[in-house]
Image (cartoon, rainbow, N blue to C red):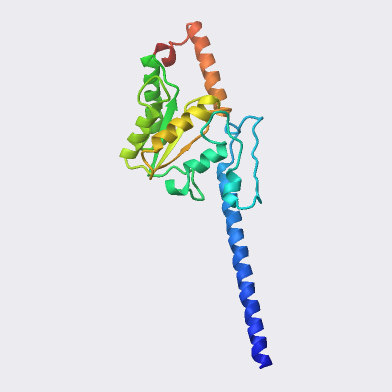
Amino acid sequence: MSALRQMRIESAKLETLGIVIASLASYFLRICRLIVFLEAARPCRSCRPPAHLSLKLKVGVKGMSTGAAVSRTLRLHGGPFRSRYDLISSCLKAENGGFGLEPFRIGEKDGLIIVDHGSRRRESNLMLNEFVAMFRDKTGYPIVEPAHMELAEPSIKDAFCSCVLQGVTRVIVSPFFLFPGRHWHKDIPSLTAEAAKEHPGVSYIITAPLGLHELLVDVVNDRIKHCLSHVEGDADECEVCAA
């Protein structure tokens, strides 16, 4: 009888140990997912929020899951998202396609939108079309659409719809802006989110603006040298001024 009781005790211990191991494995998996999310959401130099904004993680609040705690951040001034991290989370939420370990690789089902501010001057807007054609030829990406944030067509909504009609499942919006400002923090995310409402099965992400990229030094230097050469009569007018 004592032997049977001992077996039951040992069986109960093993069952308890199994439950503990399963719980630890579950928490470990959650931590791994959290690390993957934070790595995917880590902003580059151009994506970092203003210095007066900070990320506050309220972990351990009763009744709050880890995912909910991560998304509890300060709201950007007037913006539709509480932070850049929240923006990424919203863009790639599970019901909108989710994200994997390599969410930023361009795939066959990706569509790109290059969006500038937009101008009342037709010639300026046409230059974006020329750049998009150059970008498409250089990269080989099959679906690249131009868009203007305001003042001209096609709009972000038009470009988003065009990408969806071509069969994409994710839209990548690349702001053709130099530095992050109100348009990047608020206007473009808001317009993109509004466009995405009509296509719930399509995820989207908004990339950083051009920012402090080393190659921009070469671009600016090339423009300066060409303009000086033109003033001195050694070069023709560049395509920017000619347009």
Residue 221 shown left or right of residue 166 in the figure: right
- Dividing the picture into quadrants, the one containing residue 8 is bottom right
Residue 86 shown left or right of residue 51 in the figure: left
Residue 114 or 15: which is nearer the viewer? Answer: 15
View extreme (left): residue: 165
Residue 47 shown left or right of residue 175 in the figure: right
The spot of residue 189 in percent (x, y) is 48, 32
The spot of residue 3 in percent (x, y) is 67, 91
Q: Is residue 35 above or below residue 21?
A: above
Number of disc labels: 0
- Dividing the picture into quadrants, the one containing residue 15 is bottom right
Q: Quadrant of the C terminus?
A: top left
View extreme (bottom): residue: 1
Any part of residue 97 in sight:
no
Q: Residue at x 62, y 81 (%)?
A: 11
Residue 145 or 229: which is nearer the viewer? Answer: 145
The spot of residue 37 in percent (x, y) is 56, 47
Any part of residue 121 in sight:
yes
Q: Is residue 177 above or below residue 57?
A: above
Q: Residue at x 39, y 29 (%)?
A: 156
The spot of residue 148 in percent (x, y) is 41, 24
Q: Quadrant of the N terminus?
A: bottom right
Q: Residue at x 64, y 39 (%)?
A: 55
